[in-house]
Amino acid sequence: MIEQPEVAESGSDRDHGFTLVEILVVISMMALLATVMAATVTVVLRTAPTSEVRADDARSLQGLVTWIPEDVDAAPPGGFDTATTAWPCAGPAPANSHNVLSISWTERTGVTNNYAATYRYEFNGSDWHMTRYACNDEATGTMAVGRSHNLTSAMPAWNNLSPPAFVTMCAAKVDIDGQCPAGSEIAGNTSPDVRSLKLNLVSEDGTVSTIDAAPKNPDEDLADDPGASTNATPTLSQSDYVLEMYAGDTVTIDLGTTHNPSDADGDTLSVAIDSSEPMPPGITASTADPLDVTITADVGLAPGTISPPLVLIVSDPRAGWVDPTVTVRIIPEPNIAPTVSPGTYDLKLALNQTVILPLDATHGASDANGDSLTANVVSITGSPSISAAQAGAPNDPLDVEITAKPGAASGDAVSILVSIDDGNGGSVNATINVEIAALSANQDPIVTNSDVPLTMLAGETVTLFLDSASGHGAFDPDGDPLSANLDTIKPQPAGITTVLPGALEVTLTADQSMLAGPITTPVSLEIEDAYGAVVEVTISITIAPTPPPPSDCVLGTLAATPGTADRWSSGAANQLLASDVTVTLTYSGSCDGLVLKYETGDTSGLGVGTGRVFTPGSPASIIIYAKGNGGTEKWAPGTRTLTASTTSDVTPSTISTTLTVT
């Protein structure tokens, strides 16, 4: 029985509302309180950390806050498991992962589907993350392999004794302070009466963040819960899209156009890369809201279809997802036609003269794709006393042979149209205007230096330009185009490779094994004009002594601190180290190429540390990182040899120490 309070009698008929004076007093008090509260909030905001660490924490919680309440809401009180080994999906659990919370529930629409989601603390090779794996049986009765969603930025390393992520389950709703009411905290990994739970995350600085949630599906079957709604899985009109692109290109596609995803519930969809599936080789990808995917193909990829395809996840905010794929097909670069500059060249031809005209010199013929070019005479318009055709071997395919026939007279002229083809369907036309003239004798090319001395190291490559001051200063007094060729009659120096890329450019490479001193045989070349006139030039080479190696390098000691290192977990399996090991090298002088090498005993090959470079200084240190510092190397128990070496020419060039791994 509820007792009613007594009401004092009054001699008036006034009601029990507020008077104007009372209202004004209340408003004044509220204004005062609002001012004080605003000042308090301002102080809190000004003193709150604004560092990148706090921003990372916020990003880490965002994914969890999105997914956990939806999963927990759908689950019945008995659908939770906090055992670190729990794995509700088919196939083996991901390596280097620990279950924090496993959730199971049933959804019934036209058919009955069983769902599961597990939130795991997972090491991805460089950092620890919270990852959500989801699976269902698609009404078949057999759960599928879990698909992953990476939910956090980097987190502290896992520790079995004090896990950085853990769940508290209650048999009652949490109280006003967010705590399990006295006597309601569930001690076991599973329970049939979970009424609320809290996921706790501990950051690097010890700050604890908590996400509260409660199940609302008491009957295992959402169709029986009038307050619950089932979530429709997103669908695709096309599951795979073939993207054609060139090697080296970056392309952004909108899945809303390429795959046409839709959601029957009208939920907003987003896309992510499925990190549980392998990436296509030579392909990198990133995603952006709402459904954009940016794909980059390595410049070295050959034309063809890349396998496997890129696997994505299109998901709604309520744990519904579908896997679209993008198959990348590398297509050949489009052929670019050859170019000429200038397009026309004027040639004066003497009576009874034949000229071999190089079109790469006279017309600047070139190809952007690097295709081999060939000149083909298309037509000759004008006097029949002049003939033209592609020059035969051993001439270059871009050479055209032009001849004044017997009986030609001064003043005869023709216009020769030449097609320059790249062999891939690309071509460009060039014109040669030829006139017979009473010419004086052709003048030979001239060089200001007939012999150029060159000093180079064994193994070195040097490029000379024979028409420049650094070469021979070659030019033609008639203005004819010049080209350089090896003198095939004279011997060439042994150990020297000579390449003539074009025109008057010469590239020389000395063999690595050549001894210091002058080479008695020079490189012999011929510089030739368009009329076959030649001037001979030589390049005299001296191999310079190789600089001696530093002689003041002295290796001292190599030590590992501590000398005995524990692994983060016992057992026969290869494990990360529990704490950092500092390896210190002492040396004096100038030591080149100092590196630390060691074998961890991990026969899979993932735990081999080689080529760790010591920074300059004496002593110099290298840290073999433990699990909490981004380490990736796994160690087998036993004694491991650590070796420091130098490329300097000293004895001894290596020193060693040991590290005992327990």
Image: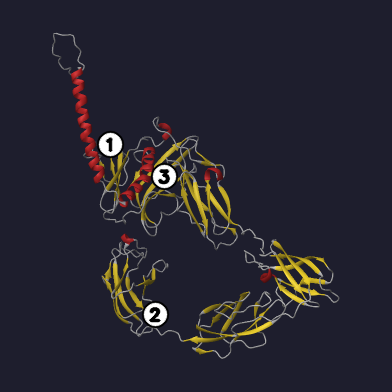
Is residue 141 among the parts visible in the rendering?
Answer: no
Question: SS of the residue at dot 1?
Answer: loop
**Count of marks, rendered view:** 3
Q: Amino acid at mark 1?
A: Lys
Q: Is residue 459 above or below residue 338?
A: below
Q: Are marks 2 and 3 in contact (CB under 8 Å)?
A: no
Q: Residue at x 14, y 10 (%)?
A: 10
The three-letter code of the residue at mark 3 reads: Ala
- Image position, residue 417 (x, y; %): 76, 65
Q: Disc 2 marks which amino acid?
A: Thr
State the SS at label 3: strand
In-image side of 362 versus 456 (left or right): right
Image quarter for residue 13?
A: top left
The quarter of the picture where residue 618 lies is bottom left
Q: Position of residue 560 (x, y in %)?
A: 28, 72
- Residue that mark 3 sits on: 116
The residue singled out by tag 2 in the image is 647
Looking at the rendered image, the disc whose residue lies closer to the viewer, 2 or 3, is: 2
Check residue 173 in the rendering and tell me which mark sits there, or answer none: 1
